[in-house]
Image: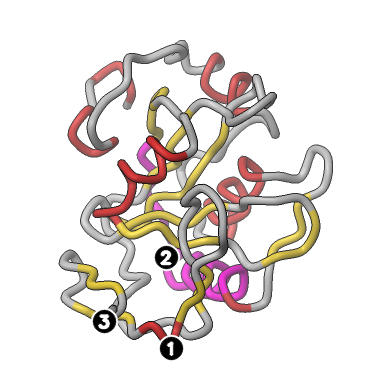
Amino acid sequence: MGGLYIPGAGISIPETQYTQPKGGYEGVILTQIPQGLLKLSNPATVYVSGSGGNPFGHALFMISPSIGYVHAVEPGTHPVRFIPHDEFERFMKEMGKTSWTMQPVELSRPQAAVTFIQQCLLVGYTWLPHHNCVTLCKEICTHGGGNVVPSSAFPTTSTKDRGNIPKPAFSHPYDSITNDML
């Protein structure tokens, strides 16, 4: 097939460096991280609706609007998934999600955030009750010295704190930043 091309980073990820789990598309599991993939630019926590019986929602960390996202997918200790920017709409459609809002983040220690993301991608992240997709984003922000960190383990609470839920669906989080989201 040829692998994944990430236009925003100008890199290709060969099929030998990732796996595509079966089921609805929730991103890929990277076995190697190509140089330049984790170049943080305009990072943000992105909140979307939950899947199945999850009424609380889901959170992803946007590395860059042109590169993609990382997120914790399942309970237990597993590598987090990477979703290329060009595959975000596929993820939203196949998983039956709608976009809620995004929370831009400024990081004073971006390399510390990148190191933590690398660990989560290659070694894994432990998702337990009250330690989940939102706390992954919170830990990335904390490691990176973020000016904003999610306030709760539940996306509905984190976004309600900001008065931004629900938001209408949008085609891509970066395209819908409005002043009330900042």
**Between 145 and 60, which is closer to the camera in this rendering?**
60
How far is the residue under mark 3 from the one under mark 2? 31 Å
Position of the N terminus by quadrant: bottom left
Q: Quadrant of residue 116?
A: bottom right
Q: Amino acid at mark 1?
A: Thr
Q: Position of residue 69 (x, y in %)?
A: 40, 54
Residue plotted at (34% across, 45% down)? 90
The tag earlier along the polypeptide, 3 or 2, is 3
* Left or right, residue 28 beside residue 10: right
Residue plotted at (44% across, 85% down)? 17
Q: Position of residue 75 (x, y in %)?
A: 77, 50
How far is the residue under mark 3 from the one under mark 1? 10 Å
How far is the residue under mark 1 from the one under mark 2? 28 Å
* Left or right, residue 34 beside residue 32: left
The tag earlier along the polypeptide, 1 or 2, is 1
Q: Amino acid at mark 3?
A: Gly
Residue plotted at (32% across, 80% down)? 13
Q: Tell me the SS state at disc 3.
A: loop
The tag earlier along the polypeptide, 3 or 1, is 3
Which mark, by number, is residue 110?
2
Residue position for label 1: 16
181 w.r.t. 148: above or below: above
Q: Which residues make up the magenta segment?
A: 104-121
Position of the C terminus by quadrant: top left
Q: Quadrant of residue 44?
A: top left
Residue plotted at (27% across, 61% down)? 67
Question: Magenta residues: mostly which secondary structure?
Answer: helix
Residue position for label 3: 2
